[in-house]
Amino acid sequence: MKRIISYLIMILVIALVFIYREDITNYVTNNIIKQEKVEDLKYNDYAKKKDYKFVAISSDLKIHKKDDIKSIFYTVLDSGTDEYNIYCDTKYKTCTKDVEEFFNDKDTLSEINNFVHPYNSFKNIKISVTNYGKITLTITHIYNNDEISIVNDEIDKFIKENINDTMNNNEKIKLFHDFIVNNTKFDTEIENSSDRLNSTSYTAYGLLINHKAICGGYTDTMAIYLDKLNIPNIRVSTTEHVWNLVNIDNSWLNLDVTWDDPVTSNGTDMLMYDYYLIDTNTLLSKDTTQHNFNKDIYLEAN
């Protein structure tokens, strides 16, 4: 009799496990295997915490649906953190697959990089994914702490010596635009190198210290300066080029300092304003090759 009762209890337990297997799996996943909670995200001094038309800061850092992935990645990148754990909602069955698919879209990741402060931009980003929905982002940033300190000192010095509260934003930008052009040589040697993105000429450090830069160096330097003055800006990139998009009096205008510092045949310096705070129609009327950006991403420029 006892044996029959034992068998009945065993059958009942198996039946209950089968009926409620999803609830049990979720409970075990959330409370036994994965005891970690969504951790607080710490923002550094350079986090913008800005919403844009293409991407916005997420207040919920758990992934519930596919549309959450882009905004959560952007939020983590914007924070400037080196490593962060993201968790999938257990009800979102294809979460880790969708995250890996998003991560492998390197073009979109690079575009998102343009909406964060240059100091928080990644040079390299890795993910590790567990089968119970934990995703670890590990981020290597373009600028190290020493480079940040040096660049800040140089730009802060310029602001202290040249900028005052009586100036409007246009005047403040023009002064720094001229400073960059007059103190920088376009680095023709590194321009076509396969390693150009790892060169200091692609950074504000290379421009301000070595006085040599390619488009990334010009653009980062201006972006850092604009952020110090609290002037809204985005970096816009194509496969060949990058420049600044700046909000002046509620209008988004293009500013390409690189193309205002042309390489001349005799090596003489020139200061131009052909690409100084112009609207997008004017920009594209001047050039549709290197400036033909993705209008589905940089919606502010449309």
Image (cartoon, helix red, strand yellow):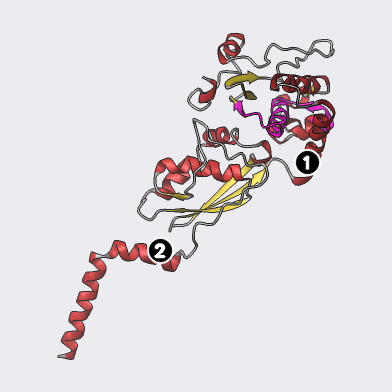
Query: Which type of secondary structure does the marked residue at label 2 adopt?
Result: helix
User: Which quadrant of the rendered structure holds the N terminus?
Assistant: bottom left
Q: Within the magenta stretch, is there residue 227?
A: yes
Q: Residue furthest front?
A: 166
Q: Report which residue position mark 1 lands on.
A: 147
Q: Residues within 10 Å of mark 2 (few under 14, many from 20)?
A: some
Q: Is residue 69 above or below residue 40?
A: above
Q: Residues within 10 Å of mark 1 (few under 14, many from 20)?
A: some
Give me the C-alpha separation between circle 2 and circle 1: 43 Å
The amino acid type, in three-letter code, at marker 1 is Glu
Horizontal arrangement in the rendering, residue 190 relative to residue 281 (left or right): right
Horizontal arrangement in the rendering, residue 106 relative to residue 123 (left or right): left
The amino acid type, in three-letter code, at marker 2 is Thr
Q: Residue at x 82, y 31 (%)?
A: 160
> Which quarter of the picture shows residue 256?
top right
Nearest to the observer: residue 294 or residue 225: 225
Query: Which stretch is magenta?
Result: 208-236
Query: Which type of secondary structure does the marked residue at label 1 adopt?
Result: helix
In primary-sequence order, the first of circles 2 and 1 is: 2
Q: Residue at x 20, y 75 (%)?
A: 12
